[in-house]
Amino acid sequence: MDTGVSQLWLPKVICDKLEESLGLTFDPATELYLVNDTIRTKLLDLAPEFTFTLAANVTSSDTVNIVLPYAAFDLTVSQPFYNTSRHYFPIRRAADEKLYVLGRAFLQEAYLVVDWERGNFSLSQAQHQVTDRDIVPIRSVSSEQSKHSGLSAGLIAGVVVAVVVVILIAAAVGYFVWRRKRARATTTREDLASPYPDDKKDHDAIELSGAGPWVAEANSTPVHELPQDSPGQQLMSTPIYELPGERVERELDASVKADKPGLKPSDGIPG
């Protein structure tokens, strides 16, 4: 099969038989088989059919018949072979007696299906009036392999559900993180807007730091307290005087009573 040529290239013995039975005229200058007007009119009235029986090889019993009417061979030829248009029968003599080339004139009544990946070539009779269409696509080998090795419908559904769940979890986590960041940003803005800490109930009171020296607050009554290690008396307190324990002295303003005769007040009372 060759769509690059229009004629049918056949062995010379077959061309000679067609020339004799159809009344064709061979032109050695162009090597074309011409048909005069009288023969053409007669052949159109007879409307003979030509049956081609084809097989994959010479030993194959599986064959197909392609029937061509004479109208498929009723063609004309002009430049560059002739200056004027002339009727001719589209067959050519092949250089090899075993060579058969079927060109475009043959494919007018047949269609060729080519599956390059599988190395399949099929030829069938063309149907000019189609009442029931049955179009079957030829799928590539790679698509069929992926189809057979693909996931089952249940597994695909499970994968889809898992993906949806993961997306929902990621969205929830993202929303939670966003809320926390937003709350922190709000708290920071409030802290910056107020000069007082949040844990102070009275924002009008200012408390000095305990690390620095004690300073009286404004508009307050100062209270003075001596250091604890000082032996002095605190202010506004009632002083208590006590003599040291190692000496025996008379207490001031004490009245001396002599229980025994012979004691004088100046002698003192034994401790």
Image (spheres, rainbow, N blue to C red):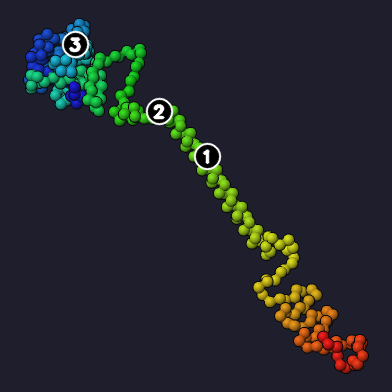
Q: Residues within 10 Å of mark 3 (few under 14, many from 20)?
A: few
Q: Residue at x 7, y 14 (%)?
A: 13
On screen, 263 above or below 23? below
Q: Residues within 10 Å of mark 2 (few under 14, many from 20)?
A: few
Q: Secondary structure at mark 1?
A: helix
The quadrant the N terminus occupies is top left
In the figure, is residue 269 to the left or right of 91?
Answer: right
- Coordinates of residue 266 in the picture (x, y in percent): 88, 93
Which residue has dot 1 on it?
Answer: 168
Q: Nearer the viewer, mark 3 or mark 1?
A: 1
Q: Secondary structure at mark 2?
A: loop
Depth check: 133 or 216 in front? 216
Counting residues from the start of the chain, the first of labels 1 and 2 encountered is 2
Q: Residue at x 89, y 86 (%)?
A: 254
Report the disc number at residue 51: 3
Q: How many marks?
A: 3
Which residue has dot 2 on it?
Answer: 152
